[in-house]
Amino acid sequence: MFDHFVVPKLMPAAPEIFLATMALLILFIDLVVKDSRRSLTYLATQGTLLALLVWRGAPYLAAIAGNNPEALSEVSEIVYTFSNMFVLDLMADLLKLFLYATVMVVLFYSRNYLLDRETLNKGEYYVLTLFATLGMMVMISANHFVTIYIGLELLSLSLYAMVAMNRDSVVSTEAAMKYFVLGALASGFLLYGMSMIYGATGTLEITGVSERLMGGNVNKGVLIFGLVFLVAGLAFKLGVVPFHMWIPDVYHGAPTSVTLLIGSAPKLAAFAIVMRLLVNGLITLAVDWQQMLIVLSVLSMAIGNLAAIAQTNLKRMLAYSAISHMGFMLLGITTGVLSVPGGMLDARPALNAYSSAMFYVIAYVLMTAGTFGMILMMARAGFEADELDDFKGLNQRSPWFAGIMLMLMFSMAGVPFFVGFFAKFSVLEAVVASGQYWLAIVAVLFSLIGAFYYLRVVKLMYFDAPTNPAPLEAGMDMRILISANGLAVALFGIFPQTIMSLCAYALLRSL
Amino acid sequence: MSNHLLSLAIWIPILAGLIVLATGGDRNAPLARILALLGAVAGFVVTLPLWAGFDIAKAGMQFEELSTWIPRFNINYHLGVDGISMLFVVLNAFITIIVVAAGWEVIEKKVAQYNAAFLIMSGLMNGIFTSLDGVLFYVFFEASLIPLYLIIGVWGGPNRVYAAFKFFLYTLFGSLLFLIALLYLFIESGGSFSILQWHQTPLTLTAQIWLFLAFLVAFAVKVPMWPVHTWLPDAHVEAPTGGSIVLAAIALKLGAYGFLRFSLPIAPDASQELSTLVVALSLIAVVYIGFVALVQADMKKLVAYSSIAHMGFVTLGFFMFSAMGIEGALVQMISHGFVSGAMFFCIGVMYDRVHSRQIADYGGVVNTMPKFAALFMLFSMANAGLPATSGFVGEFMVILGAVKYNFWVAFAAASSMIMGAAYTLWMYKRVIFGDVANEHVAELSDINMREFAILGVLAACTLWMGLYPQPFTEVMHASVNELLRHVAASKIPM
């Protein structure tokens, strides 16, 4: 009976296997080190991520340096493994690369914040971060409903625990509870949708679903029913209206370092599963899910931007801003195939649209990391620096970091010369190319409303006098990384070509 | 070297701004001022060869630079000037020196940031005037909002926050619709952001009308035209003197320039079709805003409204489609740069001493500040359009153009010269003449060397342009004629 047992190709999943091994190893190491030696856990975690980054990133560096996409040929094949449950393509590889970098930066920013807070600075924090990362990697590479679900749950369960880690805090516990209950509900939606689609097509494999749908002869009613639940589940995970309720509470209630993690890297993974499920799997139903996504997107931009205006807490404000940004990103995915009459998939406009959304997500993660990094840098033991008023008069306390925050805020608002502008630009280009001018107009009008609250942060920093005139204290390492992050927002705003074309190339080789 | 003059005109001020920023806190204020002045002068010097080496017989772009920027969207770093834009680059660089000098002793807080903001803005605005790529233009157009937002908000008056937000959001609103228009053109032209190529792209009348309206919103807010002008008086009143000078002298010209670079050549048929609309709005600005200016109690507000009226002349001149009208409008724009800049500086001079801009707080200033009163007189006259000053040339040309276009339009436009004289000279009379109004006025000291130098240079420019406008007009001819020829030809595909 073992005749048919074939050892699956392990190489495509080598980063995941390496990370899982290291996570378990670090869990064990942490068990035996004393509290005073906890830095070891931190360094081992960062080392693991760095190793992955260097290992997987080298070909990209060669490709960029030589301006030669051929250098990526080794990784640009689409490889399926584990009985087609797992896929490695260029999109997955690139997204994971950004994922490693993001998580590294997140941990780096969180370092001092955690050192100041004994309850958080436990080995579990780092191990859970690694497991969350693993979960996201699995999501990104999933080619099977069950794989997606496993990755998603690994990510979510790690994050629930991390939100609740500050267990004496009522706000944190409440946030964790809400996150857990709503997250479980969303997973239920997703599973229900998957089971419906399984019922209609008879397969759980994403590429298989796509083939069955192309073949026709599928019960459309059941399929659409499943699709609705699927989209609702995805919307929960992306945090778009009307499934956004958990976002502000969780962002606000979680320790800022965890908020940073929730707000950044999972967006990359969420983008990936949207692409996997809707584009790889259900492209034949594009007309149906596009309608749903348009509604979600417009509502998100509306509610996100309007509600953000009313916030006094910066983390809450950024939560609503995240909702609106995800709405904007969805626009890119939405416009993927509408432009083509007859409903057939044409690669070029679709590619533009998806790569614009991918670029948007990456740009957004870069900006978000910097913004929460600023909050973390200003936080002290016993002081969170997460109220808007804590940024009052920052220009007098530290003109340099006020300048960095200014760049981040204008970038979020989509003003050039910052990366946020080209993110919005490329998505709008896709929308206009698809002929949906009204959608583009709605999008820019809500961006205009959005600009108001970003401007308000700039106003607090520059126009108002500080409540606490003490100069900023922060370690040199933190200063350098935040500065680098802020300058990257400007640099990629002036030279966005590299990342843009990487995204386009990755999707070209993956779709 | 000469191939990169335009790049230098853009990046020298920006680089200088960053260097000034690096001087840090107010301990190094004197150094920051000197570096800023050097940067501004250097920025001005590199623009002079543009004028000197300009070939007046050529209608097309000169000093062109082209290199790829973002191949993913076929976006290029494409610069060039023609007879329409060249003078604005020079004017902008010149005004930057004035602004740095105007804030010399007056600005005492955050000196480095103040000067850096103006230098960076100057570079960005040169970018707007010289961009021949739609996205490059847009990037400069929108980025230039940031420094002005900070200038108004940080160094402005008591209601500065409101004014800064209003300024930013109003102009952002216009430019976002403009962005959609650019993207539409990108698709329609088969994947190009080249403005010159867009000039040739055939478009249906419906498409042209939508594009024209999108452009109109963007540029009308910036000009500003009635009824979207309300941000300007707020911004002017709250901005520091330097901010007002740049706003009036350069920033308002961006919108008008946009009409000539985008609206007319890209949507010529829609421009003809909708010219009545623009002419009507312009006349309302000229006449109605003239009346509004008459009743202002705040000097800065009065000059702000007068700016709106003068810019009404400019848009009026554009949409009569005659060489006389367009050249007159261009002359008016440059003249307004000198005159309104000087007017705001004069008000700043008084404000620095008395800390009031209310007309009622003054009276009899001539008794204590005779030199100032004489120069202020000249600029008031120029603002009212007195012959032999630059203010006259442009208005006269526009009115001449208008007579050919429609007698009643010309009549309404000409009546505004009376209005201009009324509100400007009445203000002048109340502020300068009469008995010494109060002890503040009695304690006034006359202008110092710095202030005299600034006003003297501006006065010289005003008179030069009024008496001998040919160096200014001769560079425009070829480009304006080419533009008119282009606008007359329909772009609607057969």
Image (cartoon, grey):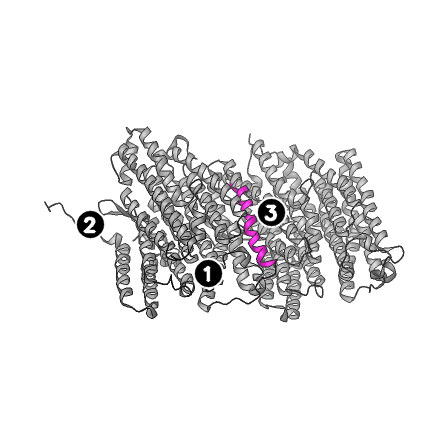
Percent from the top left, x then y, of residue A501?
Answer: 41, 50
Residue in the foreground of this view, choosing between A321 and A367: A321
Q: Quadrant of residue B51?
A: bottom right
The residue at which mark 3 appears reads as B169
Q: Amino acid at mark 2?
A: Pro
Q: Is residue A241 found left or right of B113 in the rendered image? A: left
Q: Which residue is mark 2?
A: A8
Residue A457, magenta (yes or no): yes
| Amino acid type, mark 3 | Leu
Query: Would you name the residue on which mark 1 appears?
Result: A376
Q: Is residue A146 above or below residue A407?
A: above
Camera-side mark, 1 or 2: 1
Numbered label tally: 3
Tag 1 subunit: A
Span shown in magenta: A443-471
Mark 2 or mark 1, which is nearer the start of the sequence?
Answer: 2
User: Can residue A38 be spotted in the picture?
Assistant: yes
Query: Separation of disc 1 and disc 2 at Cα?
Result: 43 Å
Asked whether residue A417 appears in the rendered view, the answer is: no
SS of the residue at dot 1? Answer: helix
Q: Amino acid at mark 1?
A: Leu
Up-down relation of residue B412 to residue B41 (above or below): above
